[in-house]
Image: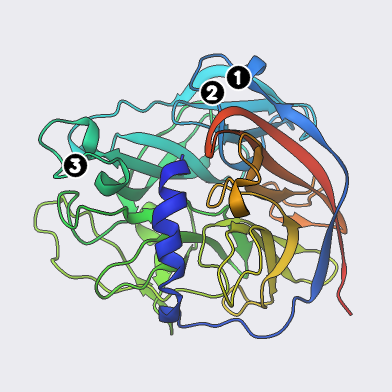
Amino acid sequence: MLIEARQASLVGLALMLGSASVRAQEAPALHLALEGRAEKVFGMDDRCAPVDLPDVNPRAWRTADGGVAMFALQFQARALRGPDLLHLKIDCHVALESHEDPDPAKYDGRRYITSTWTPDGQRVAALVHDEYHADVYPGRCLFKDGLECWWNTILSFRSTDGGANFVASKPLVIAAAPFQQDIGQGRHRGFFNPSNMIGFEGYVYAFVSTTGWLGQGAGECLIRTRDPLDSASWRGWDGHEFTVRWHNPYAAGREPMQASCATIEPFGYPVGSIVRHRASGTFIAIWEAPRVEGKFATEGLYYATSHDLLHWSQAAILAATPITHQPCGPDETNKDGWITSYPAIIDADAHGRNFDDTGDSAWLFYDRIKNVGCVPAGERILVRQRVAITSAQ
């Protein structure tokens, strides 16, 4: 999904972290440790079509018939389905198609189902990461490089048949840059990579990432709603309250200016997933980050904890590993090697239908991607590995 962009624009994003308004404080309240060996969930031989590659952080829910559905693949969205979280196989039916329409106002570029929520297993709300690549359409971009022409928006879709088919919500746009795709070309722009949705005190929350622009800091913004099926009800945190509402820059009569969301530390890079530890009530976020002087000591998977989703601990390393931002590591030591990407913590025994809580042991789902030289462009495998969660005291 964001292989090229995450190697370049997100490094720039990290350099802008001084704009964050809610800063990390203490060490994490919980300790996470990986256990055992990784197990394959989905690989290249399991595909229905060439596009079926692991390429987003996995999102799962319990269906109305007691089974489990998961989205974890590319932009012709096919679900993995099974009787439980540990026995999933691909459903070849496409739940949401991407037509790569040259008209950016259609919001039908490369559409990835990146976040889901269901109240009953039948009605399913989805946040969709929509990529518009202007470089592939003659006359749409001043540049030739894909990153310099990349424009990203978060959309809302919904299903009434258990996630078998998704249709656009009204309004469609959840989080967008306050300008159209031809403005500010020369770098990746917009909102992208929603985290999973998580319920807390009557609301449903998610993080969304932004590259930032004049008046908008780069980093992670927190959004919430009472009902994810009501797309008009999403609001972003402005540093004091949840008041930020984004507009469709292609809509008639659109407002030229809009409020900015306040970015939250310690992330700087897209939050892979959030779960709430049942025993302690503590939230756990996990994400991948490159080495950043004074912030992340090495490239790898990091986690942090919180009690309110706004104030987070310092980052702690879960696994030092090459990632999409730094696929070859120092001095190209990982050339033609494997990287780790798209992490998500999911407890097979979660109490919630949307797997947004966890006990003391869960699964870390993540992608293993083979480098071709120093580009993550080879074989892809979705795997899972046990993660133990204990008190840090």
Instruction: Check if mark 2's residue and mark 1's residue have beta carbons within 8 Å.
Output: no
Residue 43 lies in quadrant: top right
Local SS, label 1? strand
Labels 3 and 1: the sequence-earlier one: 1
Q: Is residue 331 above or below residue 310?
A: above
Q: Is residue 6 above or below residue 309?
A: above
Q: Is residue 87 above or below residue 274?
A: above
Labels 3 and 2: the sequence-earlier one: 2
Can you see residue 382? Answer: yes
For marks 2 and 1, give the CA distance: 11 Å
Q: Amino acid at mark 1?
A: Asp
In percent of width and height, residue 304 lies at 68, 69
Residue where numbered disc 1 is placed: 91
In percent of width and height, residue 357 lies at 74, 57
Numbered tag placed on residue 325 in the rendering: none
Foreground mark, 3 or 2?
Answer: 2
Numbered tag placed on residue 52 in the rendering: 2
Residue drawn at (70%, 85%), measured in percent from left and top? Answer: 26
Judged left or right of residue 90, residue 133 is left
Category of crowding for the residue at label 3, using alpha-carbon neighbours closer than 10 angstroms: few (below 14), some (14–19), many (at least 20): some
Residue drawn at (88%, 59%), measured in percent from left and top? Answer: 360
Local SS, label 3? helix
